[in-house]
Amino acid sequence: MGTSVSYLEMLLVLLFMESLMLGYTRADAGASCIKSEKDALLNFKKGLIDPSNRLMSWVGEDCCSWKGVFCSNRTGHVIKLDLRNTVLEADTDFSLGGEINRSLLDLTNLYYLDLSMNEFWDTKIPDFLGSLKMLKYLNLSSAAFVGNIPHHLGNLSTLEYLDLSHNGLLVDSLHFVTTLSSLKHLDLSWLDLAKAGNWLQSINMLPSLLELHLSSCELDFIPQFLKVNFTSLAVLDFNQNYFGSTFPRWIFNISNNIRHLALSDNGFQGSLPREMGNCNLLEFLDLSCNALEGKIPETLSNLCNLHDFNLELNKFSGNIYGPFDNASGCIARSLKNLNLQYNSFRSTLPDNWEKFKYLEYLDLSFNSFWGPFPASIGRLSRQLPRLAKLRTSSNDLPGSGSRSIHLSSNKFEGPLTYIPDVAALDISNNFLSGHIPRITGNMMSQMKTFILSNNHLNGSIPASDFIAINKALLRVRRAAG
Ligand SMILES: *[C@@H]1O[C@H](CO)[C@@H](O)[C@H](O)[C@H]1NC(C)=O
Ligand SMILES: *[C@@H]1O[C@H](CO)[C@@H](O)[C@H](O)[C@H]1NC(C)=O
Ligand SMILES: *[C@@H]1O[C@H](CO)[C@@H](O)[C@H](O)[C@H]1NC(C)=O
Ligand SMILES: *[C@@H]1O[C@H](CO)[C@@H](O)[C@H](O)[C@H]1NC(C)=O
Ligand SMILES: *[C@@H]1O[C@H](CO)[C@@H](O)[C@H](O)[C@H]1NC(C)=O
Ligand SMILES: *[C@@H]1O[C@H](CO)[C@@H](O)[C@H](O)[C@H]1NC(C)=O
Ligand SMILES: *[C@@H]1O[C@H](CO)[C@@H](O)[C@H](O)[C@H]1NC(C)=O
Ligand SMILES: *[C@@H]1O[C@H](CO)[C@@H](O)[C@H](O)[C@H]1NC(C)=O
């Protein structure tokens, strides 16, 4: 998630810088509107259905001051039309609908068109959008468009951003993208691409592509090998398709640039190749909900930038020392969220968790990890008071966030000698025994959830400790097994 936000921010910054460089800005006082463009906008408005009167300001002479209309302060031309519906949760429907009038073609300098999040029920994407020759940014996401994607969009040779995601469009071929030679960002998520054979070959004609989103596209085939053209790709999102194959090898041909790899729920089988560790810049790796098996390759210990790593619901087995306990590795320096729940790991746990200074979320539950409850999880927590002293402002240092540790449904045994100071701790369904340790006030300042049920623990929690835990939701059930 963090990564997608940062790419969006990057995009916004880029667009902003571009505006400055080209002298684009929302015209104020000086810049006046070109008459033919004002007429074009009024004709466009006439075709629209605007129940909440969002285009109320579209009156008078100066179209450059109308809401959503942006002009070049240099030429006075309308260069940007941003009619994205940003008000989503309100009683009133702020969507625009109706028809998109050809008059838009009179906006000869339009480089940015955003009609996303509106409701053009049963409207087709008009062919003539392919004639907006200057277009760099076209966003028709979530706007209830139907019908075929017009192949005319392939004429937009300067287009850099194309987002047609979340519409009811039929796609029989992605051939139209092959001529979008400037394209950097393509999002066709939630379109049904089941009939678009050779989809990847079409996309492979785009060497400048940086970001590709094809989640939930009903894709059921991915080639294992490909002579990859889009070698600068940084973001790849194939979540929720059903490939059912082994892990595609060609992904490692983009290992130099890939930062965000979202391959959740793709039916991938077999082992995770060692080459995964070559993706040096990887920050986000989601392989959850697949059928991957074997050990996690120890080469992943080399991923020095990885902060989100999710392998939830796979068939990984063996131990996790290779990736997470390699003294010469650097994964511990960056990892923030680690989720290995619902796999088949069966081993003791590495006991070096104090090295994972940024770790906020650790979920190892529903495996068969065994042995003593790792003492280093306590050392991880004991950094808190030290860091708290260094803290200059809240929430900006590791340790000041709210950590969450889930180790339930494993086979940890022996005494629980301490309780780490984290926001959530779940160690239920294990074989821990002995007395519940004393819970001291300072250490428990953050705790909101603490689940100990189904262990062999005995003893009680003194009333004074309940008070010390202030917000903690304490669920302690002394049950055997
Ligand atoms: C576009 O607007 C013009 C002028 O209002 C109108 O004559 C024409 O029918 C409209 N076309 C469409 C496709 O709505
Ligand atoms: C356009 O606006 C920008 C930003 O306000 C300004 O720096 C630039 O000088 C303006 N250009 C012209 C031609 O007025
Ligand atoms: C397109 O619009 C949607 C919804 O408004 C937004 O979430 C998405 O990031 C936009 N796509 C691009 C490429 O900017
Ligand atoms: C735009 O694309 C369509 C369909 O691909 C094609 O028929 C048409 O000639 C193209 N127009 C221009 C001006 O290139
Ligand atoms: C790579 O892209 C170039 C330019 O679009 C294209 O000519 C070439 O055929 C592509 N190569 C492959 C293997 O698709
Ligand atoms: C792609 O990667 C494979 C193995 O990872 C390698 O053999 C091949 O030469 C690479 N191809 C290109 C074009 O980089
Ligand atoms: C640690 O990582 C290095 C570099 O990948 C590797 O050569 C070494 O074998 C690993 N050591 C262990 C114990 O896995
Ligand atoms: C608590 O459990 C430990 C070990 O399981 C046992 O030795 C001890 O007698 C128990 N104490 C009580 C009060 O049940």
Image: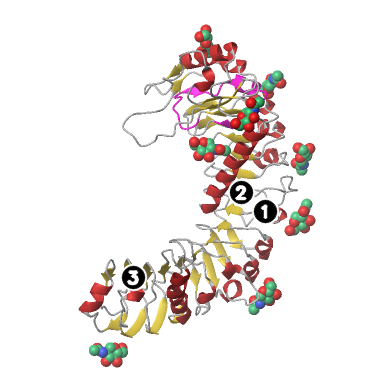
Q: Which residue is mark 2?
A: 236
Find residue 470 and report its horizontal and vertical position in percent.
27, 69
What amino acid is found at the position of numbered circle 1 in the picture? Answer: Ile
Label 2 residue SS: strand
User: Which residues make up the magenta segment?
Assistant: 116-139
- Most foreground residue, 239 or 282: 282
Q: Which residue is mark 3?
A: 445
The reply to whether the C-beta atoms of the residues labelled 1 and 3 are less than 8 Å apart is no
The answer to whether the beta carbon of the residue marked 2 is less than 8 Å from any atom of ligand 3 is no
Residue 61 point in image, percent of width and height: 51, 13
The spot of residue 177 in percent (x, y) is: 67, 33
The residue that appears at 51% across and 78% down in the rendered structure is: 347
Question: Foreground mark, 3 or 2?
Answer: 3
- The quadrant the C terminus occupies is bottom left
- Badge 1 is on which residue? 251
**Farthest residue toward the left?**
463
Indicate left or right for 87 with 397 as reference. Answer: left
Farthest residue in the front direction? 29
